[in-house]
Image (tube, helix red, strand yellow):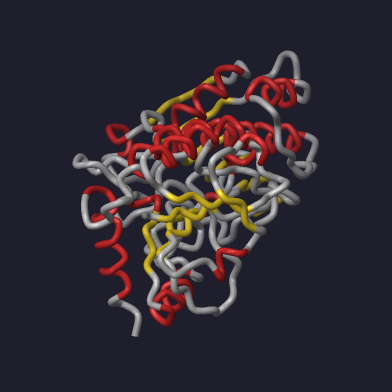
Amino acid sequence: MTHIWIRAEERPNEQRVGVTPGGVTALVQAGFQVTLEEDPSRAIALADYIGCSLAATGSWRTAPKDAIIFGLKELPEDDSPLVHRHIMFGHAYKGQPDGVRLLERFKRGGGRLYDLEYLTDDTGRRVAAFGYWAGYAGAAVALKCWTAARSRALCAPLQTFPSAGALQKYIAEDLSTDVRPKVIIIGALGRVGRGARDFCHAMGAEVTGWDIAETAQGGPFPEILTHDIFLNCILASASAPEFVPASAASALRNLRVIGDIACDPGSAFSPIKVYDRTTSWEHPALRVHDNPILDVTAIDNLPSLLPRESSEDFAAQLLPSLLGLHDMEQGVWSKAGAQFDHHLKTIA
């Protein structure tokens, strides 16, 4: 019997979960053994889950070796060997600073990583993504940063919201009744871009939407500097052009806030060169230039601002693939495993 162990998320400000109570029921009915770790901060109450075994937070470390450990965000950073098969967003394949360390842990323990970012169908499209809600929440944070920057302040700490409507109300309360920002979204046709666009439209912002056609010439892109806010919704890759060079910080510009929703500053492929580290819920904005102001917000778990809605959406997308875990040598799991094997070979 295939055993799925749903671990608690151990990083701060993370209330999401990748399997809903309905998903657990479907897995059990399909013949899976399901263990769920206790997590009092999870957006979906523990009492809503039935039919699965319960375990203490963090007990995946001593789970049976054949259990498949499923979570969303990264594991706590230590050097302990990883002996299990893990499903999560590993952030280990694009030259990220902690990626080598994670792969080394798998190599020492003999475990395997099935990275959720690399679960793709036959067209190369991800089968499940938080993209829409990342874009939606990322646009909200960027507008919050822009409002603060207009008075030369930095954005206040963030919090979770019970619904998209509550988030809209919160941001709208700070916006001037007669002034709305001009926003440019790059990657506007993708999941992330659609979420960003929907939030901006809900706030009455003026939106310019760019995608592949508008960026194919490879830059430079002076039009970005004519907008108040730039929202980057393009994942870092070798083919991505440079959208904001380091020189933009001191350039003549209207741009005051960059929302790097794709959020991969540690990658050599990052298209935004004016900053080099992520921001946090406690300090959402990084001021990279003071006169004129340029703030960057780059938070790597944006959908957690709306943990229930984003969890339910992602879990519904992922469930059909989880039901295929009986055979990890086929389909999306086989391809994700091949990615792991390829990158593990780069570890000495």
User: x and y percent of residue 104 in the render?
Assistant: 43, 78
Q: Position of residue 327 (x, y in %)?
A: 26, 53
Residue 164 visible in image:
yes
- Is 135 left or right of 218, judged from the image as shown? right
* Residue for point 28% across, 55% down: 328
Q: Quadrant of the N terminus?
A: bottom left
Q: Please tell me which residue lies in front, 192 or 337.
A: 337
Q: Residue furthest bottom?
A: 348
In front here: 232 or 57?
A: 57
Q: Quadrant of residue 345?
A: bottom left
Camera-side residue of 211 and 48: 48
Q: Position of residue 13 (x, y in %)?
A: 69, 49
Does residue 281 sit above or below 227 in this rendering?
below
Determine whether, in the image, residue 55 is placed left or right of residue 342.
right
341 on left or right of 23: left
Q: Is residue 289 visible?
A: no
Count of numbered badges drawn on the protein: 0
Q: Please name the residue shown 72% across and 20% down the image.
A: 169
In this rendering, is residue 56 above or below 124?
A: below
Q: Nearer the viewer, residue 312 or 155?
A: 312
**Residue drawn at (76%, 36%), measured in percent from left and top?**
148
Of the 4 image quadrants, the one containing the C terminus is: bottom left
Image point (66%, 20%), residue name: 165
Image x and y of residue 344, in percent: 32, 74
In this rendering, the answer to whether 88 lies above or below 76 is above
